[in-house]
Image (spheres, grey):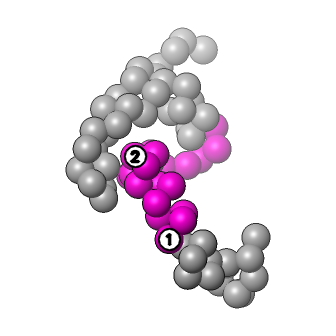
Amino acid sequence: MPDQFTDQDLPCADCGSSFVFTAGEQQFFSTKGFTPPKRCKPCRDAKKQQQGQSGGGNKFGNRR
């Protein structure tokens, strides 16, 4: 299979800065059926931290 993925610069939905979505990440996301990320790593980490403080968990109220 030819390498169809190339590094892409994507804008972060939260802070607006540009981050690199690497070819390797794209291939991984593709095999898992994930959509491309919307946030840079610092904003993803901040969101996870914020969700952890608010209780988080899934729709049944259980933490994973």
Residue at the image point whose x is 64% and y is 44% from the top = 32
Give the residue type at disc 1.
Gln
Give the residue type at disc 2.
Cys
Residue 64 falls left or right of residue 22: right
Residue at the image point whose x is 61% and y is 77% from the top = 56
Tell me which numbered mark, 1 or 2, is placed earlier along the sequence: 2
- Read off the residue under disc 1: 50
Q: Is residue 23 above or below residue 13?
A: above
- Quarter of the image with the N terminus in it: top right
Q: Secondary structure at mark 2?
A: loop
- Read off the residue under disc 2: 40
CB under 8 Å between callouts 1 and 2?
no
Estimate the x, y position of residue 20 in percent, counting from the top left.
38, 31
Q: Is residue 40 above or below residue 56?
A: above
10 Å neighbourhood of mark 2: few (<14), some, or many (≥20)? many
Is 32 within the magenta?
yes
Residue at the image point whose x is 55% and y is 49% from the top = 34
Q: Secondary structure at mark 1?
A: helix
Q: Mark 1 or 2, which is nearer the eye?
A: 1
Tell me where residue 25 sits by quadrant: top right
Tell me where residue 52 sits by quadrant: bottom right
10 Å neighbourhood of mark 1: few (<14), some, or many (≥20)? few
Magenta span dominant secondary structure = helix
